Amino acid sequence: QTVVTQEPSLTVSPGGTVTLTCASSTGAVTSGYFPNWFQQKPGQAPRALIYSTSNKHSWTPARFSGSLLGGKAALTLSGVQPEDEAEYYCLLYYGGAAVFGGGTQLTVL
Amino acid sequence: QITLKESGPTLVKPTQTLTLTCTFSGFSLSTSGVGVGWIRQPPGKALEWLALIYWDDNKRYSPSLKSRLTITKDTSKNQVVLTMTNMDPVDTATYYCAHVGVGTTFAYWGQGTLVTVSS
């Protein structure tokens, strides 16, 4: 069974920069896995941030960016705001089947 | 404006079959490249992808749940239905449906519906 791994938790100071990563148990993550990133706040449905590695939705703040880094998918937040405190999930595609990562709880402190 | 809304029972008994309906607006499931997916989230746990159906009736299922899931669409009613058989308390979760567009995945989500499995 394919496993997608994220950091369980990260802490960042307001105004700082943080990178969340998304690894695959099958090996290096490439653009062919069409990495997606979602943000979820308590009691809310997930909100899509990034699709196909680095593409932003029209509502995605400019401080969010997606990339491939060291064989993983990555989500970088630059100039973190207090409202960015949330759970972040990545999603990878494996030949038509999708797998979510376990999520990263981002604390802004 | 794309919207989706899940509906179905809030409580099911173990071994029963769950049927959930996703009713959407703002797009058509007859448009090339478009699809609808189902995702669930147990309380306090991570998201889990369940199934996808595309405009051409192509279907994809989570390998771990494939034997229990069926996804269908009614294009004329703008609805997608997910059935899950042999429900167990571990299936207690909020179930979401979400839009799949050309080149994008799950850009739009429903509000979710909490399903509790208990006798």
Image: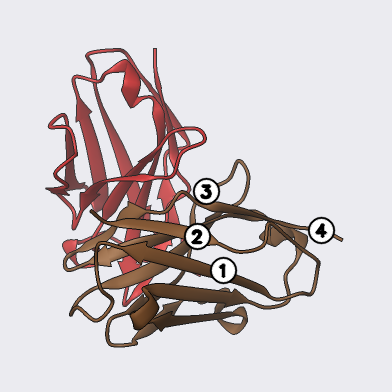
Both labels 1 and 3 in a single chain: yes
Q: Do the CB atoms of the residues marked 1 and 4 lie less than 8 Å apart?
A: no
> What SS does tag 4 mark?
loop
Secondary structure under the numbered disc 3 in the rendered image: loop
Q: CA distance from mark 4 to mark 2?
A: 20 Å
Q: Label 3, on which residue?
A: B46
Q: Nearer the viewer, mark 3 or mark 2?
A: 2
Read off the chain for label 4: B
Read off the residue under disc 1. Answer: B20
Q: Quadrant of residue B13?
A: bottom right
Element at badge 1?
strand
Q: Earlier in the sequence, mark 3 or mark 2?
A: 2
Picture quarter with the C terminus of chain A: top left
**Amino acid on which the number 2 mark rests in the picture:** Glu
Residue at 48% x, 48% y is: A102
Badge nearest the viewer, 4 or 3: 4
Give residue B118's mark.
4
**Chain red in the figure, letter:** A
Instruction: Determine whether, in the image, residue B117 is placed left or right of residue A87.
Output: right
Q: What type is the residue that disc 1 sits on? A: Leu
Q: Quadrant of residue A78?
A: top left
Q: Nearer the viewer, residue B105 or B3?
A: B3
Nearer mark to the viewer, of 1 and 4 = 1
Q: Residue A65 location in percent, x, y?
A: 16, 38
Instruction: Please provide percent x and percent y for residue B109.
Output: 37, 53
Q: Which mark is residue B6?
A: 2
Disc 3/disc 2 C-alpha distance (Å): 19 Å
Kindly check if marks 2 and 1 are in contact, taking CB atoms under 8 A apart as contact.
Answer: yes
Q: Of marks 2 and 1, which one's residue comes earlier in the chain?
A: 2
Q: Earlier in the sequence, mark 4 or mark 3?
A: 3
Residues behind callouts 4 and 2 on a single chain: yes
